[in-house]
Amino acid sequence: MILPTLKQKYVRIFFVALILLVLIPPVNITAETDTYSEIDTSVLFITELLSHSLPLIQQHLDDDSLENAKILSKINTEQFPVHLQNLRDSNSEISDEIHLLLLDIHGGIGSTDNLELVSDISKVENLLSQYNAVNPDYGKVIALILTIVDEQYQIAIIDENQALHQFSISLVKRSTELFSNTNYGDRLKLEINSFLVELEEKIQQQDDFLSVGTLITAINRDFIGHESVSYDKQKFYDNIRKLYSEMLVTLEYGDYQKAENLAIEAYLENFEYLESDIEKVDSELLYALELDMREELRDMIKNNQDTARIRIFVEESILPDLSLAESKVQTLGSVVLANTELEKELKIMGDATNEQKSGVRGEIDFIRITLQEMLVQYENEDYQSAYTSARTAYLDSYEFVEIPLRAIDPDFTLEVEFQFAQLRNLIKEKADYEQVQEVAILIKRNLDESERIVSGTGTLAPSIAFTSSFAVIFREGLESVLILGAILSYLEASRNNRFKKHVYYGVIAAIGATGITWMIASYVIDISGANRELIEAIAALSATAMLFYVSFWVLNKIEHKKWMEFVKAKVWQATTTGSVMVFVMLSFFTVYREGFETVLFYQAMSGFAKYMEGYVVLGFVAGLVVLMLLYYLMRKFGRKLPLRALFGLTMGVGAYMSITFLGNAVRELQVLDILPYTGLLGIIPRLDINLATMTGIYPTLETIVAQIILLGIYLVASLYVLVLKPRRQKQLSSMRKSHGTTNAQ
């Protein structure tokens, strides 16, 4: 018999392990089979939440405690939209009505007569009775309620808010009542009931919110079950042993409170994840461990029993049973671990489906048109139609935008909801047109923000942002580089090297002045507040005009001969004076003029390149690097540089950027209702908001006409400068030569 080599042994062990992994199926941890109606679950949760919060809101209104009423009302306005689609599936009409009433109640606290708010509360309570939850998941309902308790109790403790504290107590008591409707197994029912009793005690006694939150997490973990993600169960056994060891040391020092916290952590944060496996192999052993860890041990600590007795109980009862359970579950193979959080993490910007992104764009376009119609109706004092339009814009469109938006930025979503509510309230009150217009402008601005959040930046728009940024700094820096390079070369050639350092002094001063200009411009925009859009529009128009001017200034210097004549004239003028300040000022204004233009262009760009600032910075840095390289080449090769091509390129860049800025400026003025809005949807392609801002192309008549006119001016002017003007100069030159020949004869 030939004995196997060591290598062969390892191979056999590997294949045996592989076969076992294939044959032994993974085990999933679940609390109950999900056979309940998701719609009924949402209905019952919202009904319970509102039934407890609305009477308290009314009580606070009666007591003139508006701040507490506002806090409780905010909870309703945050939670109701989360379940709105399910509520609509149950009863669309009353769900929409309740939603609007809740927003009106919240927006009206402090600004509307309390009697009117109480009337709205009564309407909501009556509408709630029309819901019918036939088959809800009571466990999930309780879990949702306890999530609210977790959030509000924390605020109650931090802010010492008694209203939220009482609200938390009432919700926990109701959760205990609802728990009687569940049909969990005896073991789980016993555990959860014990947790709920303890939770109420902790909140009544105003325990720290961390321990309350830990307990709520454990309860919700039992209710919701666990999502299937792999984990190493061994770490939980090790953690329990480590925590108990630390607990026993803590007891030796007489710190029973810390010891209890460690015991709670061992059970809630570790043992809970092992229960399902242990129950599969030995349910009686699980019962024994649960009672020992959850109740017996903690009772001993609470009663300040002798440390030696507690140590014996842990080392001779709990730990041996824990080791026995560990050995028994090893045969099950890998298990699954649940995500302990009730709520999933927020999605990143742009993390929506393509269908959702497309739907959002369509809804936003409809809202924008509807708001325009609303303003016209309101200005014509057709208040009923204006109110209907405002309601339609929200209920029929924006609520569909909210579905993917809320998963990314719930706070922003709520902010826009309140703006829509404010708009409806202003219309109902027949407020001044300017007030209604101001809120409508805010909403229209946030429609773009909503689209950005849902759609993300994509890939093309950041590329354009990078290219545009690169082009701006390259275009502006090119002129300075060429002038300074030519000045220094001319000074060297004319043996006036003593003036060179003064040229550098002027450059340094200009860079500093440009930085100060940037800070001032940023500060002005930051403090502009409600006028921010107008300032951005003015900046864009100014940038358009400046780009138009400098583009043709450069175009007139496109020939190398003309360019050098321009530079030599400037340097000769400076050298003849002999004053060093002339060189300082010459270089200063050469650089600062371009720096000022750069600040203007980047300020205009920053308003449109939102969430793409990083690409703008990269383009700026890349442009500076290329300019430094160009400066080096110019100093080395001088006349050999293709100035005509470089100037032609900068002219094209200037034309593109000015057309982009003009399109965005016109649209800003449309948002502000300074210019009319004539939609061309279906005629002009509807670009993604990020692409639109980086190109200035929008499906409106006014933006397109403005861009076409500017493009036409560029084409005509370029034709004149590049073709007609040189041809005319050539003809005049020929005529002069001919005239000179005639005179000579």
Image (spheres, rainbow, N blue to C red):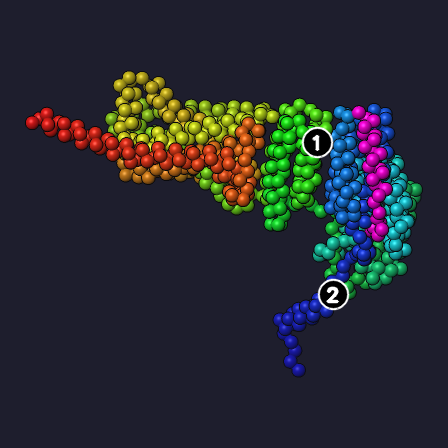
Q: Residue at x 54, y 29 (%)?
A: 675
Say which mark, if any, is on residue 384.
Answer: 1
Image: magenta residue range: 113-138
Q: Residue at x 34, y 22 (%)?
A: 583
* Quadrant location of the N terminus in the rendered image: bottom right
Work out whether residue 335 or residue 222 is closer to the camera in this orientation and state it. 222
Asked if the magenta segment contains residue 578, the reply would be: no
* Lateral position of residue 387 relative to residue 543, left or right: right
Residue 478 location (% of width, % of height): 37, 33
Which amino acid type corresponds to the residue marked 2 in the rendered image?
Answer: Pro
**Left/right of residue 511 with respect to residue 172 in the rendered view:** left
- Residue at horizontal 89 percent and vertical 41 percent from the top: 173
User: Can residue 119 be seen here?
Assistant: yes
Name the foreground residue: 123 vs 626.
123
Q: Residue at x 25, y 34 (%)?
A: 727
Instruction: Place residue 30 in its image quadrant.
Output: bottom right
Q: Residues within 10 Å of mark 1 (few under 14, many from 20)?
A: some
Residue 372 image offset from top left, x and y in percent:
61, 33
Of residue 591 and residue 580, the one placed in the foreground of this image is: 591
